[in-house]
Amino acid sequence: MIRIIRVIMLFLFAAFLMQSCEYEWIVPDDPEMPDVISYSNNIQPIFDRSCNASGCHSSGGPSPNLSAEVSYNEIMSGGYVNVDDPESSTLYTSLRFGSMKAYAQPGDAAYILKWIEQGAQNN
């Protein structure tokens, strides 16, 4: 009888432990985006805030130079954008999963992906 009580107690304790290991994940809301993403109004401000403000991807820093006057030509001629397969674009993957993720704000990668999907226009 004592053995049965021990087994029941062990079972209840294990059930209690399993219930106490619950996590609540907070997922940020998707950003509300305009229908058409503008390079000058939506993409360049991301670079200005996160990439070239600290002097990292500005003139004299590591490629690409994301200063407003040259950024579009730098990312397009440097192979950072793939309009045929937007999700494989280096610009998108580095912000979404890679080394630049820590410098991006929530939603930045989604803006860039949508801009590339729309043809990566210099608008």
Image: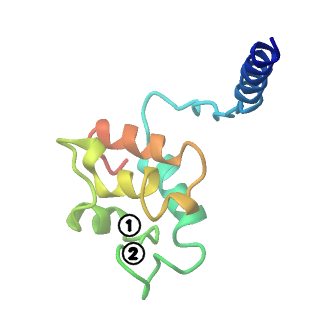
Is 21 displayed left or right of 119 in the figure? right
Residue 104 in the image: above or below residue 119: below
Q: Amino acid at mark 2?
A: Asn
* Tag 1 and tag 2, C-beta contact below 8 Å: yes
Q: Which residue is mark 1?
A: 71
Sequence-first tag of 1 and 2: 2
Q: Amino acid at mark 1?
A: Ser
Is 97 displayed left or right of 19 in the figure? left
Callout 1 secondary element? helix
Instruction: Determine the residue positioned at 44% across, 84% down.
Output: 61
User: Where in the figure is residue 44, as x and y percent of width and height?
Assistant: 48, 57
User: Where in the figure is residue 100, as x and y percent of width and height?
Assistant: 48, 63
User: Where in the figure is residue 90, as x and y percent of width and height?
Assistant: 30, 57
Quadrant, the N terminus: top right
The quarter holding residue 85 reads top left
Q: Which residue is mark 2?
A: 65
How many numbered marks are there? Answer: 2
The one of 3 and 118 positioned closer to us in this rendering: 3
